[in-house]
Amino acid sequence: MDLDRLSTWMAAHVPGFDGPVSAQKFDVGQSNPTYLLTAGSGRYVLRRKPDGELLKSAHAVDREYRVMGALADSDVPVPRMLALCEDPQVLGTMFYVMEYVDGRGVVDPSMPDAPPEQRAAIMEEMARVLAAIHRVDLAATGLQDFGPEGSYFARQLARWTKQYRATQTQDLPDMEALIDWLAAHLPQDDGRRCLVHGDYRIDNLLFDPNGPRCLAVLDWELSTTGHPFADLAGVIMQWQLPTGSEGRGLAGVDRAAAGLPSDADFIARYCHHAGIAPPQGFGFYVAFAFFRMAAILQGVGKRALDGNAANPEKGLKLGAYVPRFAELGLEARYAHG
């Protein structure tokens, strides 16, 4: 990045900014490159679109900026938005600057270094915050036009199938079978429409360093208006994966002994906070979550092959998981009721 140009722009658009500024790229995030900015006036975070040719509607940093700005006075904790730059002459691509939140990140949901009671409290907070996202008043926050109306799963299936086809690098029979099954088993539209995060998981949250309170929900690139069970299923989908910094799941963990909720327990706690009845036919939603993540990872892998990934080596590794996600999607169809 041209830091002199960035500093000039921030001086004109970020209240209280005092340069010069330095930038350090975060090691996380495969979609939109993210940087810690340090200046005389404090620390900031910059998130920008990646370089190179991009899929239409992907890497929507302007949507991230809009939704987090709209949530500033809501029950959903988000960083304060400071400025959006749509002029590619500044850094070569669109970007925004937000406040730096000094919180604690949790990469591994098994939280191996935490005592059981702390794990339980953090998972309860996860359920509470997810319900808070889905209870956001779309009209009061100006987000009623943030996504189209109609069947969320029908349009999402069409969208991600199209994205998958645009970045496909190999023939995967399991992926084709999963797409066909989802199309044949789309649930009837029940009229529920709320704000959905699109990638809600523990490593996209920042917590109080001294307790379980969530300080910020990050990475809103995939947010839209849609069905709440998509976010809920995304959490459960993630937990079916292996433990550790790569899988970031809970497969094989004795959750009861660790103080972690079962899938059913987490769903019940979410429904309690949301004030709704437990979902029926939840296997469809988990299978859909695996499909969509497979399509996302396919895009990450393709960008790595094209040289446009934020972290090419990691991008290639993530892209290699697409066959496994398709397989897990087929397994999930009847595994969750």
Image (cartoon, rainbow, N blue to C red):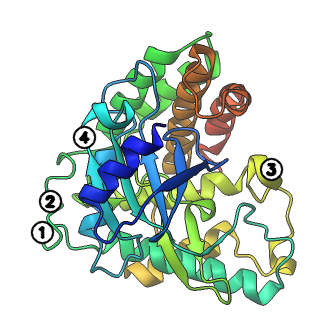
Question: Between tags 1 and 3, which lies in front?
Answer: 1
Labels 2 and 3: the sequence-earlier one: 2
Q: Which mark is residue 139?
A: 1
Tell me the residue at 50%/41% (across/down): 288
The quadrant of the rendering that contains the C terminus is: bottom right
Residue annotated with mark 3: 242
Q: Secondary structure at mark 4?
A: loop
Tell me the residue at 29%/79% (across/down): 74
Which residue is at the front of the view, 110 or 214? 214
> Which amino acid is tagged 2?
Gln
Which residue is at the front of the view, 335 or 56? 56
Q: Are there few (<14), some (14-19), or many (20+) residues within 10 Å of tag 2?
A: some
Percent position of residue 298, x then y = 57, 25
> Which amino acid is tagged 1?
Ala
Kindly report the distance in space between the C-alpha atoms of the residues bearing marks 4 and 2: 23 Å
Percent position of residue 9, x then y = 30, 49
- Position of 16 with respect to 30 (left or right) is left
Q: As displayed, is residue 103 above or below residue 328?
A: below
Q: Secondary structure at mark 1?
A: loop
Residue annotated with mark 2: 144
Question: Between tags 1 and 4, which lies in front?
Answer: 4
> Which amino acid is tagged 3?
Pro
The tally of labels here is: 4
Percent position of residue 107, x then y = 71, 61
Residue annotated with mark 4: 86
Kindly report the distance in space between the C-alpha atoms of the residues bearing marks 1 and 2: 5 Å
